[in-house]
Structure formats: C-alpha cells, structure tokens
Image: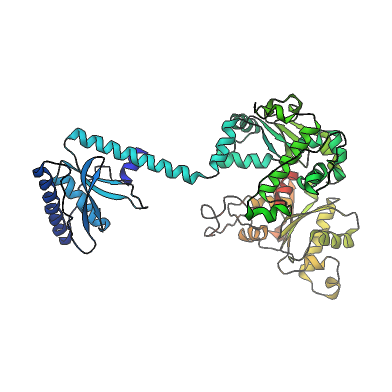
Amino acid sequence: MDESSDSVFGLREDADFPLVRMADVLFAERMKNTIREWRDSLLSKGSSSSEIKQTSTGSSQRFQMVFFKTRPGLALSGFTSRQLRVIKAVTKKHFKDLAYIRVAGEATSPRQLIVYTDSNDDRDLLMKEVKDGLRKEAEIKVRSAVGFRHVIDLLSSERKLIVGHNCFLDMAHIYSKFIGPLPSTAEDYVSSFQKFFPSIIDTKILLNANGVFRQRLDKNSTSLSKAFVSICPQIALGVKTSGLADRPCVEVEVQVDEKRSSNWNSGAKHEAGYDAFMTGCIFAQACNHLGIDFTLHVLAGDLAKESKLQNYINRLYLSWISGDVIDLSTGICTTDSSASSNLKSRYQELSFPSIVLLWGFPAKLKAREIRACIAQAFGPNSVSTVFHLDESAVFIQFSKPELVSKFMEIKETLSRNNDPISVLHPLSNILNGEYTHAATYDVYRQICSSSISKILFADQAEAVIIKHKTVLSRGKQGNQVFDKENEVSALDEKVDDPMSPPYGYSETEKSAESFYLDEILASK
C-alpha cells in the first residue's frame, strides 16, 4: 500500500519531532550547522560535482558525499534511530531545498540520505523515483521469497493436463494454500477450481475403469506403490516385460541429483518426488496401452484434448471408501460401482449406535489386540471393525447396538473392582487402566465440537474435562440425554488453555488413519 510504504521508508510528511531533551536540542543545532555548511559550500561553488570534505561528528558518526540519481547528497551512517529522526526534522524545518530519504542499500539495512533538489518539481520527481525504486526492490524480494508459488502459477498458466493418483485431497490442499479458502459447496469449489486447473486426470480412476488394468492389479489394489509394481514392473523391478502383453514397455528417463539418489535408487515410496515419478510412469504406461502416441502431443501440448482420455479427465474420487466420484466439470457426484463393489467385503456398513470410543489405553495395544480381547468376552463375531483414530484412541464398532451397553457396564464394573475375577476378565487388559475411558459416538462429537484443540484425542478429551471415566449417553428425539450418575461436563472448557485458538491449532490435527476414518464417516 502506498501509505504504508511511505511510512516505512520515510516518505511521509510526519509531524515535527519534538526536541524535549537537552541532548536532542544540542544535537539538532550541531546537525543544522553541519548541513548548512555543506549546502552553502555546494551552492557557492556552483557545481553539483564539487568535492565536499567528509565531516566527522564522532568515532562512528559521519557524513559522506554521494550522488543519488545525479543529485548531490550526504549519506548518513553511524547514527542511532533517534538521532536520524532529529536530523530528518532539522532537514524538513530549515532546508526547503533538501530532502531526507531512505533507500534500499547494498546490505539488508536501508541507506539514509540528504539530497539536494533545485526546485519543488525536482523534489517531487525525486520522491517519485524513490518510491518507484522501493516498490521495485520490494517486488523483487517478494518474488524471490514466493518459492513454490511459482510452480503452481506455471501449472495454472500453461493449462496443461495435471496428473495425480487419488488426488482429491492434494488438489483441495493446493486450492486452500495457493488460491483461497475452500468453498462451502462442491458446486462452488469445482466452478472456481476449473478456472485455474481446467484438466486433471486421476490414475486411480484410469486403472479402475479399465478391465485389463483391473485384472493385472494384485487383489484389486490400486494403491500407488502396488499399481506401480503391477503396471510398470520393468521400471519398479527391472524386468523386461510391462505385464501388458499387447503393448511394449514405455521407456522413462529421469535425472536425480546426488542428494536424493540413494532414496531414489531404493524406491522410497512416500518421498514426494518418487511418488510423482511413480504416478507419471503409471500414466505413461496406461496411455500407451490405450494406444495414445505421445510423439503427436509433444509439440502441440494438447494431451488434455486426446479423445481416448476424455472419459477419465476431471473425475476424482471424492471418497474412495464409498466409491463416490465427483466430476470437476459439472460438480455432479456419482458412485463408481467397480470401486464400491471391491470395498464391500473389506469395510462394514457404519452404524453410529454400535460404536464405542476408547482412549487412554496402554500405547502398546494394537487394534487387532483390542479386537481379540473383545472377541474373548462377547464372541468372535461381536466386533465388526476397530479403527485407530490416532495413537491414543480407537473406534470399536460392534455387530449389534446392544453390545455397546454391555461393554460400558463391564467397563464400569472393572473400574470399580480390583478383585481376582476382575483381574482375570478378558477385557481387563484394555479396560482396567487408570486412564482408560470409554464413550459413545455422540460424546465423541461433543468433545470434537469444543473450541479447544489438541493433537491427540486423549489430550482433547482431557482438556474439555470429562469428569467420569465412563460416559453413557442415549439419544432422545435427536437430543443428547445423559444418565444422572454419569453426568458429563464436556463443554467446561479451559479458557486459559495455551493450545486454544488463536494461539494453537485451528482444528484438531489428525493422523493419516484419522483421515481414513473421516472418509468413512463422510460417506454416511
């Protein structure tokens, strides 16, 4: 902004600096005499190129004759910020033909100058030149500090085909970091997104939509690393066949710097560069199988217009768990039957009344161990799934809602009793810990709705002060009702919590497994 830059670089006409200290008064008088002596000498000799002897005012304070934009001037150095304010005030008050300016220096700090101008028009021109120079310098600094923004802008301006693998979240992050806040509706999101990235293709869509690829992929898995090994074994494993009998291998050449060569050669998946490489190889091999000749598109740069890719472009998995696909061209969501059918046997139908949230259990316990303990108590078919929310909490989905109340009752019993029978109970390994808590899904929602935010759910629950280890809840006409003996103070927030906004996280951070769970919940 013009006003702020004027203020920062000393171009605004500030009010007179008050000389309230005797030291300021004496310093101002000395500076006035020194500056007048230089200016009078300059004018008396009638030449802007006259040599002016350097005037020393102390061990470190000094004036040095310079030229700025062909105008004679004095460069100030060794002065404190207060002394410079005094010099500026003296220059403004006593010398109408001198201008005090600050300009960018060779080092990080700006240069302080007193410059001679021969008219008001010349003074105005000088101020404009200073402002333009400062703005140009600031723009250079901004451009050099922008970093990866240049990559995003280049991808957008080129309007070329963007290739990703299961990349809906990737594109959403790019939008929120480089374009603006995510819109509240899918329609607004795709409408805005298309202006910046008109053509995107997801290799996960491409592989699932093609029968040959589906047969080739091991156990219907289209994870990036497994798809890379299946579709591009000649690159991933060094074999000579592509695994696609009717098409030859696509040769891929890539240069890697020495710093990353060790990771690259070992095939380090989840290294960002290597993941992008795998995605590109899969796309190249898939295009080759579809009969696309890359040599026809190299010069034209119009791969996004290739007719054989039109059925796959701008379609992204909104939720891989449910198989929902969003069309970025229209904003319409559909269900990918091939994806959802593959997942039916892997993921059970979600039922919120059948869910128990468990947190604060020993960190060494894994989901399969928790499931085994529950199966010993309620039977092998009592648990549908155990999800890790994070390292401190799990969701347990029972096969029947009535098992939830039985589980909670046993939790209460084991918490109160420490007799031999309780110690030997199959659930004692996960329920009799001092810090172990259990609650229903409704309580989980209450805890997460708090403005307090912690990284781990166990810390989040503690921050909103759960008064009892076990919280029973039951719904009544959509309203939350709690048993009196297990009353919860779930919204009794600690106002002075250091992690609360605006000092902490704006939202509860979740692990990768948490995002995986959120996809399932979102599908409901």
Q: Which one is in front, 256 or 152?
A: 256
What residue is rendered at 79% in x and 74% in y? 418
Residue 1 visible in the picture: yes
The image quarter in which residue 286 lies: top right
* Residue located farthest toward the bottom when viewing the structure as drawn: 420
What residue is rendered at 75% in x and 69% in y? 433
Quick check: 290 above or below 44? Answer: above
* Residue located farthest toward the right when viewing the structure as drawn: 380
Q: Which one is in front, 329 or 369?
A: 329
**Residue 2, percent from left and from top:** 34, 38
Q: As drawn, is 244 to the left or to the right of 92? A: right
**Residue 518, percent from left and from top:** 71, 46
* Residue located farthest toward the left when viewing the structure as drawn: 44
Residue 481 visible in the picture: no
The image quarter in which residue 189 lies: top right
Quadrant including the N terminus: top left
Q: As drawn, is 363 to the left or to the right of 343? A: left
Quick check: 334 above or below 447? Answer: above
The image quarter in which residue 430 lies: bottom right
Check the image and tell me how it is coloured.
Answer: rainbow
Q: As drawn, is 370 to the left or to the right of 81? A: right
**Residue 415, percent from left and from top:** 76, 68
Q: Which one is in front, 303 or 170?
A: 303
Q: Which one is in front, 346 or 472?
A: 346
